[in-house]
Amino acid sequence: MPLVEIIALAQPTEVDIPTVLDRVALATASAMGCDPGAVWVTWRTLEPGHYSVRGETPEAQPRGSHDPIARISAFYGRSEETIAGTLEAIARSLAGSLGLDASCVFVVYDEIAPGRVFTGGAVRT
């Protein structure tokens, strides 16, 4: 069960967050070879003044800075190729959905070691 958490500044009104979440989930599932229903994607909007780059704190998403940040957490054991493909899929999907260049997205992949997550009613090993 991959979990993708996105935090970003407020988006323009034409950006539909639920659509972005669906696109990111589908891209993640495709890259990881899993069921899209197994991918969880969340979004948090940062309030103005809560994100600074080079001393700039815009109220909404600029086109060329203040990257949306995505963090994927997934079970340990996937190949380097799958991890790289997943990072790229999330970045491209998120960037495309927000009307940004892929160079304006920051994505981190965190592997969850066996015994380090509780889900489905049990600690997963």
Image: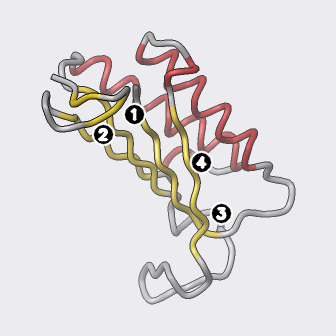
Distance between the alpha carbons at the discs numbered 4 and 3: 8 Å
Q: Which residue is mark 4?
A: 101
| Upstream in sequence: badge 1 or badge 4 | 1
Distance between the alpha carbons at the discs numbered 1 and 2: 7 Å
Q: Is the residue 6 above or below the residue 81 in the image?
A: below
The picture places residue 66, in percent across and down from the top left corner, at 52, 69
Taking the spot 32% from the left edge, 18% from the top edge, the residue there is 82
Q: Which residue is mark 1?
A: 87
Q: Which residue is mark 3?
A: 63
Taking the spot 50% from the left edge, 19% from the top edge, the residue there is 29
**Type of the residue with mark 1:** Leu
| Upstream in sequence: badge 2 or badge 4 | 4
**Type of the residue with mark 4:** Asp
Task: Classify mark 2: residues with Cα within 10 Å, few (<14), some (14-19) or many (20+).
Answer: some
| Upstream in sequence: badge 4 or badge 3 | 3
Q: Which residue is mark 2?
A: 109
Task: Classify mark 3: residues with Cα within 10 Å, few (<14), some (14-19) or many (20+).
Answer: few
